[in-house]
Amino acid sequence: MRHSGRDRRKGEEQTMNQLERTLAIIKPDSFAGGHTGEILAMIEAAGFRILGMRMTRLSKAQAQGFYDVHRGKPFFAGLVEFMTEGPVVVLALERENAIKAWRDLMGATNPAGAAEGTIRKKFGTAIDRNAVHGSDAPETAAYELGFFFSGADLA
Ligand code: ATP
Ligand code: MG
C-alpha cells in the first residue's frame, strides 16, 4: 500500500527532528588565542547540548589516528603538527541534525571562503589554522566520539 502524502511528510519530519551527536574540537589556534569562551557561547546559543567536554593535548600518534582518513595527503604532516602544538578542547554535542548544524556554524574549511557569522570566519586565519573541527557524517561522528569519550560518559 502506498503511503499518503501526509504519512510521508510525517516520516520526514521525524527523521529531520532526530537528536544527533557530533564531535567538535576547539583547535590549538583558537584555544591559544583565548577564544574558547566565545566559541562555547556560540555553541550554546545555537541550541547544542554539551554532553561531554574535556581539555587535552594530543600526542602525535593520537592526531595521526584521529585524522587517519587524511593519511597520505600532502597536508597530513602539517595537520598533525598543528593539532599537537598546544591544548585543545574536545566536545560531544547533541542537537537535532547536530552534524550539519555544527558544520554550518563552523563555516567552510578555508576561513577565507567562510560565511559571515561562522566560527571559522571569525577566528580562523588560514585553511590549515581554521579554529574548529567537526565530524562530517554519522559514521565519522560515531568513530570520533568514541575516540575521545567512553559510552558511559555520554549516557
Ligand atoms: P575538519 O576535519 O578539521 O573539521 P574539514 O572537515 O572542514 O575540517 P577536511 O577536508 O576534513 O576539512 O580536512 C581536515 C583538515 O585538514 C582541515 O580542517 C584543514 O585544517 C586541513 N586541510 C584540508 N585541506 C587542506 C589543504 N588543501 N591544505 C592545507 N590544509 C588542509
Ligand atoms: Mg573533516
Image: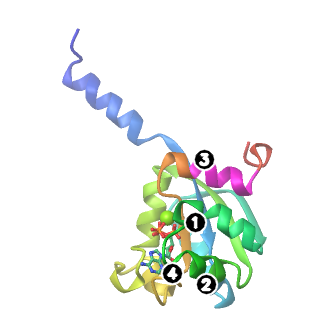
Give the residue drawn at x 70%, y 85%: 85
Q: Quadrant of the N terminus?
A: top left
Nearest to the eye among marks 2 and 4: give it: 4
The residue labelled by disc 4 is: 130
Q: Which residue is mark 2?
A: 30
Q: Earlier in the sequence, mark 3 or mark 1?
A: 1
Query: At 40% from the left edge and 79% from the top edge, which residue is drawn?
Result: 117
Residue 35 can be seen, yes or no: no
Q: In terms of secondary structure, where does tag 4 sit?
A: loop
Reading the image, the residue beneath label 1 is 44
Q: Is mark 2 within 8 Å of ligand 1?
A: no
- Taking the image as shown, residue 53 lies to the left or right of residue 71, namely right
Disc 4 under 8 Å from ligand 1? The reply is: yes
Label 1 vs 2, first from the N-terminus: 2
Q: In front of the other: label 1 or label 2?
A: 2
- Look at mark 3 in the image and give the residue it sits on: 142
**Residue in view at x 34 percent, y 29 percent:** 11
Q: Nearer the viewer, mark 1 or mark 4?
A: 4
Which of pointers 4 and 3 lies earlier in the amino acid sequence? 4
Task: Say which of 132 and 72 sits in front.
Answer: 72
| x and y percentages locating residue 20 in the rendered image | 53, 46
Name the N-terminal-most of marks 2 and 4.
2
The x and y percentages for residue 42 are 54, 72
Report crowding for label 4: few under 14, some 14 to 19, many 20 or more residues within 10 A (C-alpha).
many
Q: Residue furthest front?
A: 72
How far apart are the alpha carbons under marks 2 and 4? 8 Å
Q: Secondary structure at mark 1?
A: helix
Q: Residues within 10 Å of mark 3 (few under 14, many from 20)?
A: some
In the rendered structure, which segment of residues is drawn in magenta? Answer: 141-149
Q: Disc 3 vs disc 2: Cβ atoms closer than 8 Å?
A: no
